Image (cartoon, grey):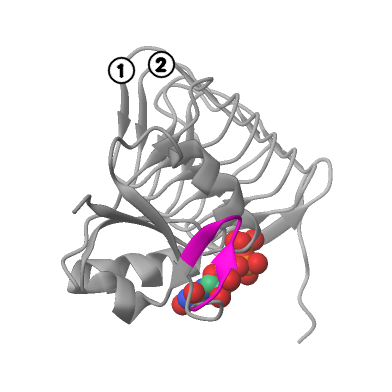
């Protein structure tokens, strides 16, 4: 029987990632995996729950936009011995020396220029750009249209909202977006963002939380 390849998450993100795999995975049998929607069909494909899938799943593509959830699902996959699988649209442009860890989902018109390192299960949604000398951590999400200029380091689990623009850093002095930070949509980030902070606006500033 053909290998079983799962797209974990059958909601908005998963329905955007499944078409990147359809018709491009040889004889592999494609299914959605979703713990809330299991038993049904989504866009013509069956939905299994994790237990049902993991027993015979050959590989899984993590298709949930939230970085923390993706990390948790990756741990679940590792514990079950199911490897991460990536997905990419044929319009993705990758230039020189781009190193990408397993599980990346690269949507249409993503551009990765040169000398870039990207961690596990990266999500780059449509029209996102990663410029030269960037270092992207594990489980990072770029929503549609993120423009990340050169010499930027993005920590594990950071989420960059739609249309965010990140100012370039300098060689040896990168602009840093800390682990777990959230950059609001349309934000223009001109300086480092501390780990766990949420920044919005132009220039982007932290949201002050009520005590
Ligand atoms: N989900 C799941 N198991 C988990 C966490 C999430 O099956 O442990 C599924 C959840 O049921 C939902 C999908 O992942 O269908 C996430 O969908 P959501 O609309 O929250 O996010 P998006 O698709 O935009 O990333």
Q: Is residue 179 visible?
A: yes
What x and y, as percent, mark residue 149?
Answer: 59, 25
Earlier residue among tags 1 and 2: 1
Q: Is there any visible trace of residue 197 in the rendered image?
A: no
> Eyeballing the image, is 98 above or below 198?
above
Picture coordinates of residue 65, whole percent (x, y) = 57, 58
Q: Judge: label 1 CB < 8 Å from ligand 1.
A: no
Q: Is residue 98 above or below residue 75?
A: above
Name the residue at 66% across, 36% down.
Answer: 146
Classify 10 Å Cα crowding around label 2: few (below 14), some (14-19), many (20 and above).
some
Ligand 1 visible in quadrant: bottom right
Q: Residue furthest front?
A: 1
Q: Residue at x 39, y 65 (%)?
A: 71
What residue span does the magenta drawing correspond to? 39-46
Are discs 1 and 2 less than 8 Å apart at CB?
Answer: yes
Does residue 150 lie above or below 47 as drawn? Answer: above
Location of mark 2 (residue): 114
Q: Is residue 82 magenta?
A: no
| Residue at the extreme bottom | 211
Identified at 60% across, 53% down, the residue is 15
Label 1: state its secondary structure: loop
Q: Which residue is tagged 1?
A: 97
């Amino acid at each position: 029987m053909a290998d079983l390849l799962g797209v974990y998450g059958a909601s908005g993100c998963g329905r955007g990632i499944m078409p990147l795999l359809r018709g491009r995975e040889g004889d592999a049998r494609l299914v959605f995996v979703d713990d809330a929607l299991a038993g049904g069909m989504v866009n013509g494909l069956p939905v299994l729950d994790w237990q049902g899938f993991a027993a015979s799943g050959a590989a899984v593509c993590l298709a949930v936009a939230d970085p923390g959830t993706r990390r948790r699902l990756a741990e679940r996959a590792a514990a079950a011995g199911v490897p991460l699988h990536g997905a990419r649209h044929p319009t993705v442009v990758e230039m020189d020396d781009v190193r990408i860890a397993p599980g990346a989902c690269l949507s249409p018109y993503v551009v990765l220029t040169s000398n870039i390192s990207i961690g596990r299960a990266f999500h780059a949604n449509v029209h996102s750009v990663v410029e030269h000398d960037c270092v992207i951590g594990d489980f990072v999400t770029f929503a549609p249209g993120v423009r990340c200029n050169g010499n930027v380091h993005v920590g594990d689990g950071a989420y960059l909202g739609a249309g965010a623009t990140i100012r370039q850093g300098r060689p040896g002095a990168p602009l840093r977006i800390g682990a777990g930070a959230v950059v609001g949509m349309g934000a223009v980030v001109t300086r480092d963002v501390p780990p766990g902070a949420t920044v919005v606006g132009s220039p982007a500033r932290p949201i002050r939380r009520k005590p």
